[in-house]
Image (spheres, helix red, strand yellow):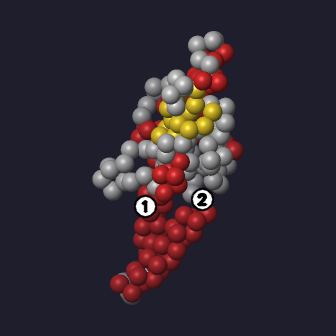
Amino acid sequence: AKTRSGSLIKQIETEALTAVRSIIGEALGGGFTVVGAASRISRVIGLHDRWQTAVDNMYDRELSRLEELFPDMSIDALQDMAEQLALDYRGQLINSRALTIARTEIIASQNTGQLISWLQASDNGVLDLNQAQKEWVTGPDGWVGIAVCDVCLELGGQRVPVLSVFSNGEATPPAHPNCRCNMNLVVLTGLE
């Protein structure tokens, strides 16, 4: 977790990435939940460019709206009000980004750990990798408002040798941020 985490995170400073890796490692060690990891991550990350632009645009819109609502109020007071609204919005976006990072990186680390355990089982003579495959298992479907995305639907059920990559070029899930997929080991019995 401390070395693999962060490969899907875009626009993050090295120091923040180091902190995120440490947080994910602690979470996987049983230190706290995904929500707890997200809370800690929110304290060390910023926004990527697109979301920062959204905050800046929100400030401009709110300042214009407030100027219309309160034409007699000083510009300084209006700017303070717009700034507070923009800061609240920024906080919501950071919390959302932190939760996405926590979910994605924890599942990525779990899947990588699963693959490593299969390799160790092979090294210990418990598993013959020539008689095994890994299978992409899509995240749960049917949750309220959540469905498996088209990217993952295409990968679902795909089987490849344990040491190979799936059709998306990845050795393990996730396929994208917030992906809920994992993988199973399929031991071939000659009937497959």
SS state under label 2: loop
85 vs 118: above or below: below
Residue placed farthest to the front in the image?
191
Residue nearest the observer in this picture, 39 or 106: 106
Q: State whether residue 25 appears in this view.
A: no
Instruction: Residue under label 2, please give it.
Output: 48
Q: Which residue appears at 56% of the width and 33% of the height?
A: 134
Whole-percent x, y for residue 146 in the image: 37, 54
Whole-percent x, y for residue 160 in the image: 60, 37
Say if mark 2 contacts mark 1, CB within 8 Å: no
Q: Earlier in the sequence, mark 2 or mark 1?
A: 2
Quarter in which the N terminus is drawn: top right
Q: Which residue appears at 43% of the width and 44% of the height?
A: 139
For residue 123, which numbered disc appears in the image? Answer: none
Q: Is residue 87 left or right of residue 172?
A: left
The three-letter amino acid code for the residue at tag 1 is Asp
Whole-percent x, y for residue 154 in the image: 52, 52
* Dot 1 alpha-carbon crowd within 10 angstroms: few under 14, some 14 to 19, many 20 or more: few
Q: Is residue 145 left or right of residue 15?
A: left
Instruction: Residue under label 1, please give it.
Output: 88
Residue nearest the observer in this picture, 32 or 130: 130
The three-letter amino acid code for the residue at tag 2 is His
Q: Which residue appears at 58% of the width and 13% of the height?
A: 126
Q: State whether residue 50 appears in this view.
A: yes
Disc 2 and disc 1: Cα gap in Å? 17 Å
Q: Looking at the image, is mark 2 or mark 1 nearer the viewer?
A: 2
SS state under label 1: helix
